Amino acid sequence: MIRPLIVKEFKDLMRDPRIWVPFVISALIMPIMGLVIAGPIKGAMETVGEQLRVGIVDFDEGNESKLFINWLINNNASYNLIPVILERGNISHVINVAKEKELEVIIILERGFTQNILKFSRPSVRIINIIREISFFGGGVVGGSRVVNLIEEYVSRRFLAGTNIDPEIIKSPIIPKYISYLETKNLLLAGRPEAVLTSLGFASFFLPLILMIISVTVIQMSATSMAVENEERTLETLLTFPLSRIGILTAKLLGAFSVSMIGSLFNFIGFIAYFYIFSSYMISPIQSIQPTEELLGASFDISMITAGPEAIYVFLSIVVTLLFMSSLGIMVGALSRDVRIASTITGPLSMAVFIPGYYVAFASSKMMGTVLRLIFYVLPFTQPIIMSKDLVAASIPVETPIYILGSLIISLFLIYITARLFSLETLSNIQRKLSRFKRKKKILIL
Amino acid sequence: MNVVKVKDLIKYFGEFQALKGISFSVNEGEIYGLIGPNGAGKTTTFRIIAGLLTPSSGHVKVLDYDPGDRRVKRFISYLPEDAGAYRNITGYEFLKMVAELYFDKENEYKEALELGIELSGLGERLNDKMKTYSKGMKRRIQVARALMVKPKLTILDEPTAGLDVLHAKDIRDVIRDFARKYGTTVLLASHNMLEVEGLCDRIAMINEGRILIEGDVKQLLEMYDVKSLEELFIKLVRGEN
């Protein structure tokens, strides 16, 4: 009985491009997103097995520490690492040497290492992870974990020397004390690196993600606001008010911009709350640190990595990007006869933000390469995304003011183009041409 | 004095010729009607006069200015056909915004706002968001918006289209009374011949981008020996005797 009605509903929906275009876009976008994320995952997995440059500082200078160092040197090939013996010194000195020699992990054999092994007591070993770039996939933690496993294996064997007992039987034969050194931030963090780096890794993903969401929301909001003017036929009235076209456009832009700033503020409040809660629960208490090692014993806080002029650069970049997105949205809205058409167009445009955005969020700087990084830094829709990631995970380049200027120039150019479009004559001409193109395509299909 | 002068106006949209050489003029203080069926070219003509579109050829002068001249925008008010309303803005806020856009001096702006409130006739409903308004109420606020700035020329495109009899009459009364009281020149388009007959001093009948006839309503009816403009229009289009 209801078959004709079902057929009508189906035809009605399927013949409306505003309905099927988003489906097609989803089908096309998903594999692209997969490719975008798969690359960085593969890259992160490959680093796990890479050769590790390990520094060793012997504060113990006992027989057992020397035996351990010799064992490490003799077995370097089988463990795929390059051991480098470092002079004793305070932690700043050790880290400076490690930076020069491009080491990834430093083992500090503390005083009492030999004595503890001889007494079958767990020796303390300090592990310093040199983190050059924080990644969502936790790269950088792996090196430290590999080294700890290796020391545990050695100490277990020493404890069970002369027996046939499997060393696997001994659990936690050493007391590892972890320190992470964030090279780009020149920051020392005490505690298990996994907790710190997971927290920062999440932040290095979530901050760009929030900016992607804000960017897309701003396009949608300004496109809708402008499309409503077309749909409700208020644009025609607006254009007859005693204002210049650029005045009307500026009012529209500033309105959308102000609302997007408020929206962004809410997003950031949410992000800071998220980060605060996350770090409160995830970060281990600071372990006791010998004062002679001059290690700063500060608890981890987001402000430690985001304070200073870098945060101001990110803020400026967001302001320019919001201006760009508002202008883009207004252009889309002005060309759309109604809100649904505007939404259909903003869908693919959002992908222009999400696809490079996801790549930026997941890929390391090394993987991106210089040219791609430069492009991401100059384009307004990727600039705050890569900048916010670098703010957390690495460091913002010194040329950033030039990049912001570049983004501003692109944004102003877009505003100029939008202003040129902003007349009923031009808009109706473009809309008519688009309709004619659609009709021609329809005839060709038939 | 001619407030509007249109001569040999031609407008193409791509290959389609919407206007095929239209000429007419509107005197100061006059209510002038442009009547014709849908697609005749009324809205295109109005959009050109309002400076929203540029003519392909021909001349248009509004108060001796080109319609695109920014100075002329202060003296004209244009009400497009089916002009909607900002959904989340109250009627009062809308009128206030328009008054502020047109006038810098506080006394002038307040006077315009008071006039707008009076012309809208919406009373307390002005404090409600316009998305809650009926079509008739939206039209009333748009007419009030167009007239409150006391323009030298008011262009009203189908001001009563789609409204019920009572709302349509209210709007006609507002337009007529306002034009008489303030001596405003009104250029009005409608396909409702009866409405134009009762409201306009002079009319031009337009069909397929051409003016068929122009003149004083009474004189035209007498000249063609017809009882109504509708009868006259059919006679002209179909060539009936």
Image (spheres, coloured by chain):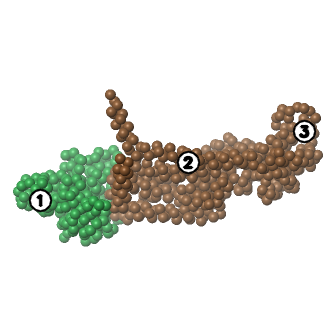
Chain colours: A brown, B green
**Horizontal side of residue B189 vs B90, given as left or right:** left
Work out whether residue A373 or residue A90 is closer to the camera in this orientation and state it. Answer: A373
Q: CA distance from mark 2 to mark 1?
A: 68 Å
Q: CA distance from mark 2 to mark 3?
A: 52 Å
Q: Residues within 10 Å of mark 1 (few under 14, many from 20)?
A: many
Q: Quadrant of residue A145?
A: top right
Chain hosting mark 1: B
Q: Which mark is residue A158?
A: 3
Going by the numbered disc 3, the residue's amino acid type is: Arg
Q: Which residue is mark 2?
A: A32
Residue A216 in the image, given as x and y percentages of width and height: 50, 51
Residue A214 in the image, given as x and y percentages of width and height: 52, 51
At x 58% / y 58%, what residue is drawn? A376
Q: Are marks 2 and 1 on the same chain?
A: no
Q: Which mark is residue B217?
A: 1
Please, is residue B50 above or below residue A51 in the view?
A: below
Going by the numbered disc 1, the residue's amino acid type is: Val
At x 91% / y 48%, what residue is drawn? A66
Residue A86 in the image, given as x and y percentages of width and height: 86, 55
Is residue A280 in view? yes
Is residue A272 in view? no
